[in-house]
Amino acid sequence: MTERAPAPGGLALIESLVNTLDLESGADALDTSEGRARLALTAAEDLADVRELRESLRAVCLAHAGHPPHRAVTPLGDLLAAAPLVVDVRADDGSARLRPAADPAPLLARVAAAVAEALTAGTWQRLKACEAADCHWAYYDRSPAGRGRWCSMQVCGARAKMRRYRAR
């Protein structure tokens, strides 16, 4: 839906997960083996849990843009509390980061680590969801003021402006 560059760092994973569902067409990339492979989902991961995580992330992205949730969802904090993470401290320079405890890492742990990374980098609030009700595509807002509203000015932005114009 968007011509924007992917989100930075671990936010690209979250953006990619949220954007596995095209609300306009109803197509869900999680229904395909290629879509699941893009997220490196393990065979043990329950798709219902992945979809629940996706929609909780979408609700947070909508909140970042100042919009109410698109539907009732499990709070993201409740889901991430179950993520198996460890603090990894490097001996050579003392730097620390959160990383998934298991290998291969389950999606929930990778998302939790990405959220923690984005929080410390100050980029978490810039991951938003398009305000168009038939879109809600995730995008990273690179605008100087951080006030982006649509995933694509040429598609969703133009549609919204045209609706407002016709309503007058």
Image (tube, rainbow, N blue to C red):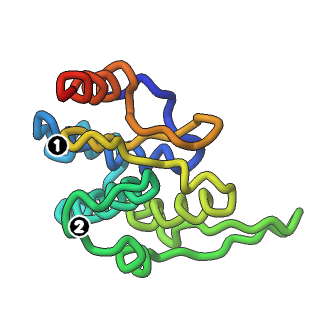
Q: Residue furthest left?
A: 26
Horizontal relation, residue 95 to residue 13: left or right:
right
Give how far across and how far down residue 40 sits, in percent: 36, 49
67 and 113: which is toward the camera: 67
At 39% from the left edge and 24% from the top edge, which residue is drawn? Answer: 153
Quarter of the image with the C terminus in it: top left
| Amino acid marked by disc 2 | Asp
Give how far across and how far down residue 77 sits, in percent: 42, 76
* Residue 48 higher or lower than 5, as above or below: below
- The quarter holding residue 56 reads bottom left
Horizontal relation, residue 99 to residue 102: left or right:
right
67 and 166: which is toward the camera: 166
Q: Residue furthest front?
A: 168
- The quarter holding residue 146 reads top right
- Residue labelled with disc 1: 28
36 and 1: which is toward the camera: 1
Give how far across and how far down residue 6 sits, in percent: 49, 34
At 80% from the left edge and 65% from the top edge, which residue is drawn? Answer: 95
Quarter of the image with the N terminus in it: top left
Badge 2 marks a residue whose secondary structure is helix
At 65% from the left edge and 36% from the top edge, which residue is drawn? Answer: 144
Of mark 1 and mark 2, the one earlier in the sequence is: 1
- Residue labelled with disc 2: 49
124 and 33: which is toward the camera: 124
Badge 1 marks a residue whose secondary structure is loop
- The quarter holding residue 82 reads bottom left
Q: Measure how far apart labels 1 and 2 are at the Cα level.
A: 14 Å
Horizontal relation, residue 119 to residue 153: left or right:
right
At 45% from the left edge and 60% from the top edge, which residue is drawn? Answer: 111
| Amino acid marked by disc 1 | Asp
Give how far across and how far down residue 161 sits, in percent: 30, 25
Q: How many marks?
A: 2
